Image (cartoon, grey):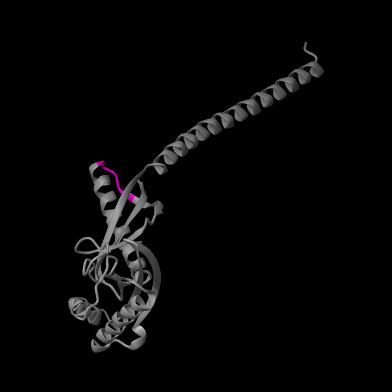
Amino acid sequence: MSDPALDHHASSRSFFSDSTNRRWLISASIMAVGLIAGGYLLGDGLTRAKAADRSVTVRGLAERDVKADLATWTIAYSATAGDLPTAQASVDRDSTAIRAFFKELGFPDDAIQPTGVNVSNFTNNGVQQFTVRQRMTLRTTDIARAERAVKRQFDLVRRGVVLEEGSGMAYTFTKLNDIKPAMVAEATKDARASAQQFAKDSATSVGGIKQATQGYFSVEARDGDSGGGWGVSDTPYKKVRVVTTVDFYLR
């Protein structure tokens, strides 16, 4: 006949053993699920990180034709004589002729100003010579009137003014800041079009901007060289250009 106390003790040990085993099984199951979920999230995260790192770098161009709003005409002339007063008097006559020329064209007196003078002397076959060089500059925002003046520049020559090298009209566009925002937008739009073509060819799509560089604005002569120098080498017609570099995300 069995002892009730012993049976009860054995039953208790069996109960606690089963309870401990169940707790271990539950813990192991939770851990396994956690590892599986963590592995999935890690793998999905790496995939998303890799996808987020996909990008394409393209350049966008924007150009705009503008007309200069400032004209600067530098007139260089000189006179040489055996003494300084004679050379200076000759230069003064040329200065008077230049001022009269611009006054006849309708420019105000303060539109033309002296901007430089130089005096040098040298000896030629034992005879001392003096040379006086002077510069006068016309500065005006009346572009149409400035163009007419350049077309009549030979009237100065007919009046005895010998134009030296370095004389010439320069036209400047000063309102670049007014058109910068719109041109940057145009260049960015052009860059996105290039990125979309790339994405289409690679079976992807274009996302947002990862980073962008505006680039430099350039203002050049629309119809060729504007290097100045002689006569009408420059024109008031300019071309403004900007190239942006943009990195787009691909998705």
* Nearer to me, 168 or 183: 168
Query: Is 147 drawn above or below residue 25 in the view shown?
Result: below
- Residue 94 in the magenta stretch? The answer is no
Task: Residue at 25% x, 70% y: name it.
Answer: 66
Query: Is 168 drawn above or below residue 212 in the view shown?
Result: below
Region rendered in magenta = 202-206
Q: Position of residue 193 (x, y in %)?
A: 26, 54
* Nearer to me, 211 or 139: 139
Q: Quadrant of the C terminus?
A: top left
How many numbered marks appear?
0
Decide if residue 140 is in sight here.
no
112 displayed left or right of 224: right
Could you tell me what secondary structure mostly forms the magenta stretch? loop
Decide if residue 59 is in sight here.
yes
Task: Residue at 27% x, 87% y: name it.
Answer: 100
Task: Residue at 75% x, 17% y: name it.
Answer: 10
Query: Is 195 drawn above or below residue 173 in the view shown?
Result: above
Residue 86, by quadrant, is bottom left
Furthest residue toward front: 126
Q: Quadrant of the N terminus?
A: top right
Q: Position of residue 150 (x, y in %)?
A: 21, 76
Residue 182, by quadrant, is bottom left
Q: Position of residue 165 (x, y in %)?
A: 27, 65
* Nearer to me, 73 or 136: 136
* Nearer to me, 113 or 244: 113
